[in-house]
Image (tube, rainbow, N blue to C red):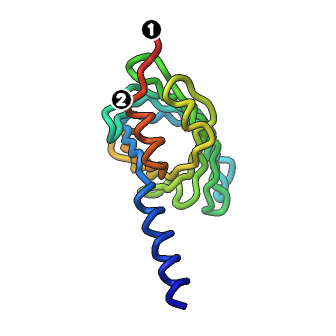
Amino acid sequence: MKIIILNLFLILLLNSVNSAELKIEAFGKDKYDVYEVSDSRKFFAWSNDAVWLTNIGINGSLTAKGILEIINGISSSNIMSKWTEVNGDYFYAQFFVKRGSVNQDATVQTFEIVSGTGRWEELIGQKCIGAYTPLIDSKFMWQGNCEITNKTLERVQNYKKPE
């Protein structure tokens, strides 16, 4: 029994040592075209423009477009965003609302990096989580978190664009 507990402890310890977080923050402005289909159904064509930064010193601009729908108080979405860093490399991320609603204070989404160039190729297929908070005058802030290995984070952070 002691061996099993020791092995479990070592596995958990090694897993925590090998994991890192890529944190991303974005700040921008939303635009909505709203269709109030009925009292219980709303459809939104949504877009935004924003700037973003990471905990590893990478930043850039982003645009996103997608649809949001509220039916009987339950939100669904399908949003695609393009994140372009200062050196011109970019990645596309696809978002889906998991909790909250666009007509509430905040939402939690899952997102996946579905395509990318440069350092972002390393993260294609990475699934992450984010939280969106609307502010005033259609402005918003957003925070995301991707749990990746220390080695992956190091490669992404230290990537050198070929000349």
Q: Residue at x 62, y 31 (%)?
A: 115
Label 2 near label 1: C-beta < 8 Å? no
> Hey, what amino acid is under mark 2?
Asn
Residue for badge 1: 163
Tell me: residue 125, above or below residue 62. Answer: below
Q: Which mark is residue 59?
A: 2
Q: Quadrant of the N terminus?
A: bottom right
Q: Nearer the viewer, residue 81 or 28?
A: 81
Q: Secondary structure at mark 2?
A: strand
Q: Secondary structure at mark 1?
A: loop
> Hey, what amino acid is under mark 1?
Glu
Q: For mark 2, does the 10 Å Cα neighbourhood hold few (<14), some (14 to 19), or many (20 or more) residues? A: some
Image side of residue 88 versus residue 110, left or right: left
Q: How far apart are the alpha carbons under marks 1 and 2?
A: 20 Å
Where residue 156 appears, x then y in whole percent?
A: 44, 34
Q: Residue at x 48, y 21 (%)?
A: 89
Image side of residue 155 versus residue 64, left or right: left
Where residue 126 appears, x then y in whole percent?
A: 58, 44
Where residue 130 appears, x then y in whole percent?
A: 47, 51
* Residue 142 appearing in the image: no
